[in-house]
Image: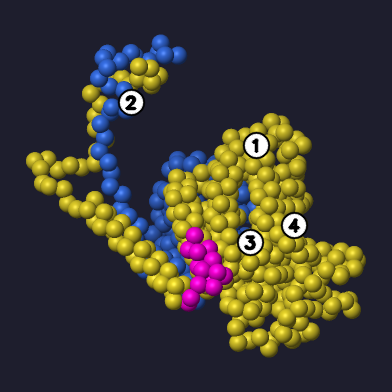
Chain colours: A yellow, B blue
Amino acid sequence: MNTLNNAVLIAKDPGWLIAVKGVLVFAICVLCTLMAVWAERRVLAKMQLRTGPNRVGKFGLLQSLADGVKLALKEDIIPAAADKVVFILAPIIATSMCFMAFAVIPMTGEVNLFGQKTALQMTDLPVSVLYILAVTSIGVYGVVLAGWSSGSTYPLLGGLRSSAQVISYEIAMGLSLVAVFIYAGSMSTSTIVGSQHQHIWNAVVLFPSFVIYVISMVGETNRAPFDLAEAEGELVGGFHTEYSSLKFALFFLAEYVNIIAVSALATTLFLGGYHALPGLGFTESWLGGWFTLVWFFLKVIFFFFIFMWLRATLPRLRYDQFMKFGWKVLIPVSLVWILIVASLRVLQQEGAPRIATIAFAVGIVLLVMAASSLIDRSKAKARAPQPEGDAPNFPIPSLPEVNSINVSGGK
Amino acid sequence: MSDFIEKKNSGQADINSVPFSEVEQPGPAPLAQQAKGFWVTFSSMFKKNQTVQYPDVKAPTQPRFHGRHQLNRHPDGLEKCIGCELCAWACPADAIYVEGGNNTPGNQLSPGERHGAVYQINYLRCIFCGLCVEACPTRALTMTNEYELADDKRQKLIFEKEDLLAPLRQGMLAPPHPMYPGMTDTDYYNGDVKEAHPSQAMNGDK
């Protein structure tokens, strides 16, 4: 029923409407954060056989609001060693950038807002997904600068970790999105949503991309099990160790808005955006089209639940394992996958007979199977028991035969 | 800098030639096994949670829980504490301060010659080990199950004798008052005094 493209729909929005939508999107983000913090604490508690916050307001719903007020009233400390300007600028960058990502997310289909036929999407660029990637990576500057400007060791380590982490996972993320671009033939969010509505969710056809995106979005947002940048057990608080009061609250806000932003992007690119589940299309006209907002947020909540579930289940990765996983698994796999998707797409567009496409797909499957069996065989060979010798060969550090080691490295 | 490091004696060893044997890493577990952990957390959401809603619901402690101390009384109301300071000496945290005092005919607080004139327990120091209770020769000092011992001033956490004394029960008279007629402190100790005698009530001084 929502055949009209959002891009066309919102193109003739008057200026005041865009401003109203901006305020609305901002309010939604802040409200979502408040609810998300509460929901996360409650769900996490449930998963750990606890109750979670239940004191402030009904079911503890106002807990995060109370925490926010408490944070705002705390003493604001700027360390003597801090670079003052950058120190203040960092949380502002981190927060404002993650809000900006929401500007291009289509949250509803065609709705009536103050007598105007429009959609709850501030603007639609032909390259809106690239725009999201760009602003979220600027958001990383907030984290890096916070770590650098604090004038303290742990924040510096946290900031460095975070920059390395986000850069390497953004590659995997970008690559997983390339498959979506190829498939939808566009980088505009509303067009991608539209193409999924016409065919099938990208999460189904591009399942490997979907999995890679979901993994890398956790890495991108510095969340457990990839929360190396603020690893409590190792780096005190990571990049925000030296922050207090409202500045800390801003980082907190940024983290959660970021989570919601990547979840919203995942919804838009892989789960059909604001459209209803297949077969429930009739619900989209309820409440004058506003019911699509419910669908959108149901999907976002689904992703947010995955975030919470991961946090409750998995321990934090070691840094080298984390990097290894990003560079040696995610990136090569998504590269190969893009190659496959691109080839299939070209075959389709060049009008190759269906049989050729199917043969290509079968060939790929056979190749993957052959490769994996080869890997298995080489692993089995490596694991084969060693021939029995006189002494058991325990892996012990051997004793050096000299009493000194040359550290200078000179010849 | 390099002067501090002993020069290698020959070309036989540098950091790269130290022999090592590779430790075999166990590979990742099968996917089904890894998914098990996710099922644990997911299914926990539907289990009964273990939280006690503390200020609203107070779970009873074990009967022998080491809580706040109590200074007990004999059945006629006289204090059991004789001011011997053994509790203070036994205390490993130096939390107890006792000053003994003489019992006089006009001021008989406990059976026998002596009573505890000053008795303080500092709950900022007390570690609730119960050694004081073990040390007490008259069973004057025991522990209750009360555990809510928080306050907003340090001074308030030094409990005086009045704070620690057990309340007067049925048949008890508030000391100071004379001992039960015809009873010695040994009789008191043996538990032969069951209640206060009417003559013990001090209706004005003698």
Element carrying mark 4: helix
| Residue annotated with mark 4 | A100
- Residue A343 is situated, as x and y percent measured from the top left of the image, at 50, 64
| Residue A40: assigned label | none
Above-or-below relation of A216 to A39: above
- Label 2, label 1: how far apart the Cα atoms are: 34 Å
- From the viewer's side, name the closer residue of A378 and B1: A378
- Label 3, label 2: how far apart the Cα atoms are: 46 Å
- Specify the amino acid type for callout 4: Met
| Residue annotated with mark 2 | B15
Marks 3, 1: nearer the viewer: 3
Element carrying mark 1: helix
Subunit of label 3? A
Subunit of label 1? A
CB-based contact (under 8 Å), mark 3 and mark 1: no
- Badge 4 and badge 1 both on one subunit: yes
| Residue annotated with mark 3 | A262
| Residue located at (82% from left, 63% from top) | A22
- Label 4, label 2: how far apart the Cα atoms are: 52 Å
- From the viewer's side, name the closer residue of A208 and A93: A208
Question: Is residue B21 left or right of A277 when viewed as pictured?
Answer: left
